[in-house]
Amino acid sequence: MGDWDRLAALSWADRRLLVRAGALLVQARFTLASTALRPDPRARPREATVTASPPQLARAHALARLVAVAAARIPLRVACLHRSVVLWRLLRREGIPCALRLGARAGNGPFEAHAWVECGGVALAEDDAHLATFAPFTDAVAPAGEAECRGAHALKPRAPRRVRTASRRS
């Protein structure tokens, strides 16, 4: 089955999510370097896994596949942190409980870090053998400012500014 056949097999909602994931990946690629990551106050500690129902977990896996496809098709190189932040945002937007995790390579080699998303105690779109080489940090993280708001549509439009006109005095 070719790429076009796979695309045709997707629902319209999933096609829109694929395009949205691609756009968010491009945005993350250019803006994530200037974004701080802070502990996520809504995430549970590492020991208490985030619970998700079987339909939510199935949907999370489907979204992870869509983000992976989008990451492979955009003409930019994206890292695990970009993919993980985009997947975390899409899952949060759909109300699926998840946690954005960071970890460092365990061992004596050069420093390496990795980012992934956990849902229901499962690391989404990750190879277990690869993930086992990283020691996770204790706290889940969230991009600064996103832990407080529910999503991109949480911003409210500003009231129009009143324009001052200059009056001439004689």
Image: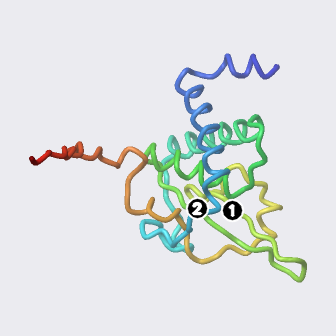
Quadrant in which residue 35 is drawn: bottom right
The residue at the point 10 percent across, 48 percent down is: 169
Q: Residue furthest right?
A: 109
* Label of residue 115 in the image: 1
- x%, y% of residue 15? 59, 25
Quadrant in which residue 113 is drawn: bottom right
- x%, y% of residue 139? 55, 74
Residue 93 against residue 140 in the figure, above or below? above
Whether label 2 touches label 1, CB < 8 Å: yes
Q: Quadrant of the N terminus?
A: top right
Left or right position of 99 against 125: left
- x%, y% of residue 54? 52, 45
Left or right position of 45 against 122: left
The residue at the point 64 percent across, 37 percent down is: 22
Helix, strand, or loop for circle 2?
strand
At label 2, which amino acid type do we have? Leu
The residue at the point 47 percent across, 50 percent down is: 92
Q: CA distance from mark 2 to mark 1?
A: 7 Å
Task: Determine crowd level at label 2: few under 14, some 14-19, many 20+ residues with C-alpha closer than 10 A.
Answer: many
Left or right position of 103 against 119: right
At label 1, which amino acid type do we have? Ala
- x%, y% of residue 58? 58, 41
* Label of residue 100 in the image: 2
Q: Earlier in the sequence, mark 2 or mark 1?
A: 2
Q: Nearer the viewer, residue 84 or 166?
A: 166
Task: Determine crowd level at label 1: few under 14, some 14-19, many 20+ residues with C-alpha closer than 10 A.
Answer: many
